[in-house]
Image: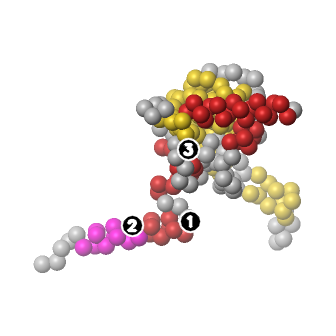
Amino acid sequence: MVSSSGPAIAGLAVGIAFIFIMSLTTGLSPEKTCQLSGQVDVEPFRLPRWVEANPEIVIGKIISVKSRVIDDSFTSSNLVNQDTGKPVEIEQITHYSFVTIQIERYLKDSTGSKSNEITFRDPVSASCYPYGERAIFFVGKAGDSPQLFWYSSMFVINETRGTVQSQYLEDHGEQPIRLIDFENKITDAIENQQSQH
């Protein structure tokens, strides 16, 4: 007797193989999707540089995450279609997670806002930002919009151990850092930059 589940199993196997091949060809695996924040990391995390580059560094808790599609499509004045002679239209549609942080404390605020909340956008899945997660966030700017750049911008706080860790550092074999030591390094980097200006 032939099992009727044969075609279903074969179909499932083909589907799994397709997902696996796609993950290899795109350089992604399902567990790595949270690393695609903003831009690709081009160099190792360096705290003094990160402190200087980001106008806001806060300790806070995630209180809201919403997904939204932003259409940033535009017509390029530099590129012309050779067949039509018209400017080329560039389609740029991005799925963003808009993450709202309830700010517990500012470690740096170059904007002078001292707001109780900040919302930034990040082109990764909303699942990368668990509700209630407490962390140190390095918040940059993309035009007028606050944005997290790279996946070393969020350092999750382990309340039990009193440490912080980012996905980037973890992926590169770095051990968690004591929260107080990390805060002190941020403060030192800010003071060094202020003394140079």
Q: Secondary structure at mark 2?
A: helix
Q: Position of residue 183 (x, y in %)?
A: 62, 31
Neighbor class of circle 3 (other Cα within 10 Å; few <14, some 14-19, many 20+) is: many
Query: Residue 154 or 45: which is nearer the viewer?
Result: 45
Q: Position of residue 35 (x, y in %)?
A: 56, 51
Q: Which residues are magenta?
A: 6-17
Q: Nearer the viewer, residue 22 or 10?
A: 22
- Depth-wise, is mark 2 or mark 3 nearer the camera? 3
Q: Secondary structure at mark 1?
A: loop
The quadrant of the picture occupied by the N terminus is: bottom left
Give the overall secondary structure of the magenta segment: helix
Front-most of 23 and 8?
Answer: 23
How far apart marks 1 and 3 lie (CA) works out to 23 Å
Looking at the picture, how far across and down is residue 34, in whole percent? 53, 49
- Looking at marks 2 and 1 on the same chain, the residue that comes earlier in the sequence is marked by 2
Q: Kindly identify which residue carries mark 3.
A: 166
Horizontal side of residue 112 vs 23, given as left or right: right
Asked whether residue 162 appears in the rendered view, the answer is yes
